[in-house]
Image: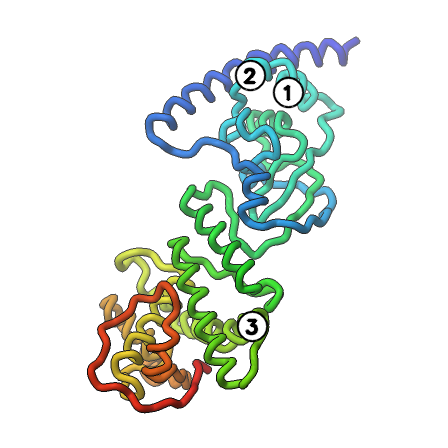
Amino acid sequence: MANENTFRTSYHEGVSKFRSVRNKAFWQEMLHHFTGKHNELLNFDEIRSRLHLHEEHYQGVHDVPLNQIAGSVGRYKDFTASFLPKKAEMQERWSRIYALANSLEGPPPIELYKVGQVYFVRDGNHRVSVAHQLGSKTIQAHVIELPTTVPLRPRMSDREIEAAEAYANFLEETGLSRAVPGHESIELTVAARYHELMGYIFLHERVQEKVEGHPLTTEEVTADWYHHVYEPAILLIRKYHVLELAKGKHTARTEGDLFLWLMNNLLDLRHQYGDRAPVQSFSGALKTYLEEEHVHVPEALESENDQSVLLTRNQVKNTRPAGAKKPTEPEDPDPSETCSQIT
């Protein structure tokens, strides 16, 4: 009897609380409508489709941070991005769960999908909403993970999600996840530039097949490009903390953005000057980048010798990747026909 009275009291508290938070949700929706800011949960089925997610692995029961639950399987329109309830007809269920959460028994674990750093509610949306209002930091959940190397974080903008989708398409086209299991994510700030990055892999394929004398699989080409072109450049960027040195100068860049800048810079110089290009290595291009950003060049970088070798001008002319900006054609052609790659 005492337990029943306690539950009834908590239920009525829940009704009052629901009305308060639903009113808050209304004004929050109005504010976001006028400011144009995103205030909805992520749609799991849409994200799953856009990121080409197929595998599922049960990870057991975990205490999951509430601030990382940012989406739902079927109820993404019923709550705001902070899990405030939107509809009046949700009052009964929400209030009962509020009462249960305040009882000795407590609610059972919810069910979540995990994609990157984001969790999606499979079952338990009301429990997540109530937990937020009770000030909880975590919630117990059965977790099913959909593995991906596509970076997905809570509170990503529409533009960032578009970039994540473009990266998923890049992975699908290049087979990078199959070619280099456990590879580090390649993040670009502009989604359209993944097409340009793909162009450099196709260029690498043409050069490698000319060197090897036979066709190569997509995975073979992608793995070779990752280990012998992309990775060495990224290691140099990190070794000399280039992004940190240039932080705050003009627009923010990711490592992937800077890699494309280096490739375009080196390729354009090679196109114009052939074997007489003034800069022919990633270290030299990094030095140029820092100089253009008006940042002091580390003394060790001045003497770095990373042995980068680029295509000859005639090869560049015939294999320039799609999306790369084409510089002005030089008047004196380079007679060299040596086939080389970045190593």
Q: Nearer the viewer, mark 2 or mark 3?
A: 3
In the picture, the disc for residue 18 is: 2
Calculate the distance from the C-alpha at mark 2 to the C-alpha at mark 3.
54 Å
What kind of element bears circle 3? helix
Amino acid identity at mark 3 = Ala
Name the side, left or right, on which 313 lies relative to 329: right
What kind of element bears circle 2? helix
Calculate the distance from the C-alpha at mark 1 to the C-alpha at mark 3.
52 Å
Label 2 or label 3, whichever comes before in sequence order: 2
In the picture, the disc for residue 263 is: none
Is residue 234 visible to us here?
no
Name the side, left or right, on which 286 lies relative to 200: left
> Residue 325: x and y, percent?
30, 66
> Residue 8: x and y, percent?
69, 10
Label 1 or label 2, whichever comes before in sequence order: 2
* Colour scheme of the rendered structure: rainbow
Residue plotted at (50% across, 42% down): 154
What kind of element bears circle 1? helix
Label 1 or label 3, whichever comes before in sequence order: 1
Residue plotted at (52% across, 48% down): 152
- Which residue, given by chain and number where applicable, does mark 3 sit on? 223
Q: Quadrant of the N terminus?
A: top right
- Which residue, given by chain and number where applicable, does mark 1 sit on? 98
